[in-house]
Amino acid sequence: MWCTRWFLPLLLLPLPTAPPYFLVLFLFTLALHARPCFYCIILLAALFLSSCYWQSFPLHAPLSAPWADNITTFREALNASVSQTLDMYEVAPPIIRVSDRCWCDFAFGVFEPYDVQKWERDSVERAVAEIENQLKTRLENRSDETKYASTLDSGEAGSMSHSQKSPEQRTVPLKESLFILRSLFGRGRSNDVTSMSTSNSPQTSQTTSEDPAERLPPVEASAPDNPLFPGQLDLRPHGFDVILDFRWSRTA
C-alpha cells in the first residue's frame, strides 16, 4: 500500500477544474512512475468514483466568481433567484445542496475546463426549486386543514340547530305514532264496549226491579283451616296450594 503515496495530492484538490485530458494524462504518467499494485488500483478507482458526491456548502460560502457586484455568496444568489413574494429569511435552509459532479468530468468535452460557474448556478436553481416545492406543499396542507375545520364547524352547527329544536317539534313524531296505534286498536275496543253495553242493558233492567237486599252476593263461609301437625309446612300463604309433610314413620 506504500505505492499510493503518490496519489495523495489528488485527494487534496478541492475542486479540480483542469480539462479531463490533462487529468487523465497526469494519472497515467503517475501510474507509470509509482507502479501501483492491483489492490492499489482498485482502491484508487473506488476513491475516484466515490468523489462524484460533493458535500453541501453553507449559505455564507463565497461563489467562485461573483454574479454581480452585490451577489458574491450563495445566500445572495438564492435571494436573487427566488421570487420576490417569498421571504428567504423564513424558508431558506442553513446549507445548500450542490449538484453532483465527478472529479474528472467529461460533460464539457475532453479539452475544455470544467465550468464551475454553471455548476454553482445549477445548484442554486435546484435549491430554489426545492424551496418552492416545499412552500407549495405547505400551502396545500394549510388549505386542506382549513377545509377540514370548516366541515367540522358546519357539522357542529347542524348538531346545535338540531338540539335547539323546541320540545313540541320533537314530540310531533311521537304523537303521530300514538295516534296511529290508537286508531288501530280503538275500533276493536269500541266494538267490545258497544257489545258489552248491549248485553248488560237487560241485566241492569232486571236487577233494578229486584230488591237491593237480594242483589248482595251470598257470602260463603270460609272453610276452617285444618290444624297442622308437627313436621308439616304450609306453603299456601306463599301462593302455593301445597302442604309439605316431613314426618318420618317407621313400620313395625
Image (cartoon, helix red, strand yellow):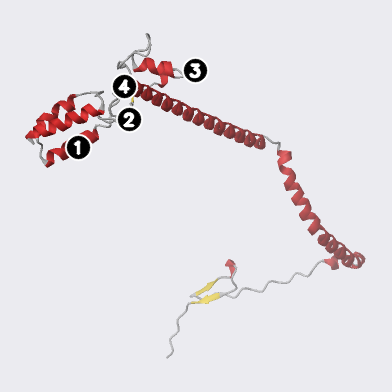
Q: Are marks 1 and 3 in contact (CB under 8 Å)?
A: no
Q: What residue type is disc 3 on?
A: Thr
- Frontmost residue, 198 versus 146: 146
Quarter occupied by residue 209 = bottom right
Image point (74%, 51%), residue name = 177
Q: What residue type is disc 1 on?
A: Ala
| Residue corresponding to mark 4 | 116
As helix, strand or loop, the secondary structure at mark 1 comes to helix
| Residue corresponding to mark 3 | 85
Quarter occupied by residue 224 = bottom right
Q: Marks 4 and 1, how far apart in space?
A: 24 Å
- Mark 4 or mark 1, earlier in chain: 1
Quarter occupied by residue 25 = top left
Q: Is residue 189 above or below residue 175?
A: below
- Frontmost residue, 117 versus 236: 117
Using the rendered image of the protein, determine whether residue 73 is visible from the camera's viewpoint: yes
Give the foreground label among 3 and 4: 4
As helix, strand or loop, the secondary structure at mark 2 comes to loop
| Residue corresponding to mark 2 | 107
Disc 1 crowd, CA 10 A, few/some/many (<14, 14-19, 20+): few
Give the foreground label among 4 and 2: 2
- Mark 3 or mark 2, earlier in chain: 3
Give the numbered dot on residue 130: none
As helix, strand or loop, the secondary structure at mark 3 comes to loop
- Mark 2 or mark 1, earlier in chain: 1
